[in-house]
Image: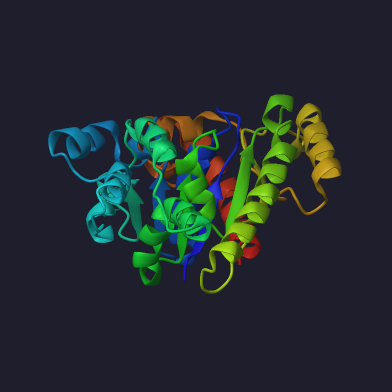
Amino acid sequence: MPKVVSMINWKGGVGKTTLTLHLAAGLVLQHSKKVLLVDLDPQCNLSFLAIGATDYINHTYTKKGETLKSVFDNYFSRSSTNAHNIIQQKKVNHSAGHVFVDIGIVLSHQELTLLDMKLAREKRVGKDHREETKFEIEKLSIIKELIGAVAGEYDYVLLDCPPNVNLVTQNAFFSSDYYVIPAIPDFLSTVGISSIKQYMDQFNNDYRSMWTYAGLPGSYTDTKFGGIIFNMVDEYGGGPKDGHNQIFKSTIAQQGIHAVFDNYVTDGDGITTAAQMNLPVFAYKDLPRSHANAQKQAKYLEGVVNEFVSRIK
């Protein structure tokens, strides 16, 4: 079974999508793993970043190709979903003119927001309250079933979640073994971390009780906290500059010594330049204008990926 991880932060602009893509790329390049990416954000940023806006528009709108929206549409119409039709293989850019063979992606769709409202209104009537509880759990199991259909084909599944807790996002949490919080070293990025952890604790408690009450087979598996990864860190003298280092220390004091990844990603134009070309920063040889900074950021990301592997197990 793959290790399924939700990437979440209530605050936008923390590099969550970029980190998700680079974790996938690093898992393939450094550890020879097979990875599935799932873009749950209606803004479709991971989809654009991974395959390019032109290819995304061609697939989704010109060819009317299948996306995550198709999975939820099938739930409403009581139709079966062919996971292999939903997952786009050999689409995620590796380097100039090359794609990753071992990364699949489920593309997002701008209409996911409307689908979430429809999902919230969906009410299936059961013969008693216990059966209705089972139907509510089925409503949260849509993504879990999609992943389950291809569980033997991937080592990791990374879910890029929007900064909210709507039902589509809750589907991601329900399917996940872990959640990881990307952050940047500033007050607004870190102030909500305790709230995320409290929410996830309550989420686990609620659905563990519902699972037992509904009489479902097996047992509910908690979505565990996997850690905090800092992005866009400014360095001075071989470590985070003083202001950023203080955020590191205060976050560790609040969340625990093992809550924060030892490795982090530095700030710089390498990742930005790579993103403009729809490439991961590991393709720094294709980035002559920002080669040095991109190579440096790639090295830091390698450390993050290695620590991710050691923590998520």
x and y percentages locating residue 48 in the rendered image: 34, 35
Q: Residue furthest left?
A: 63
Horizontal side, residue 243 vs residue 39: left or right: right
Q: Please state, as top left, top right, bottom left or bottom right, where the C terminus lies in the image.
A: bottom right
Question: Is residue 147 or residue 231 the one in the foreground?
Answer: 147
Residue 310 locus on image (x, y percent): 64, 64
Say above or below: 260 vs 60: below
Residue 146 visible in the shown view: yes
Which quadrant of the view contains residue 65? top left
Residue at 63% over, 49% down: 203
Q: Residue at x 64, y 36 (%)?
A: 183
Could you say which is closer to the camera, residue 13 or residue 101?
13
Front-most of residues 253 and 23: 253
The residue at the far right in this view is 253
Foreground of the two, 61 or 173: 173
Q: How many marks?
A: 0
Q: Is residue 98 above or below residue 31?
A: above
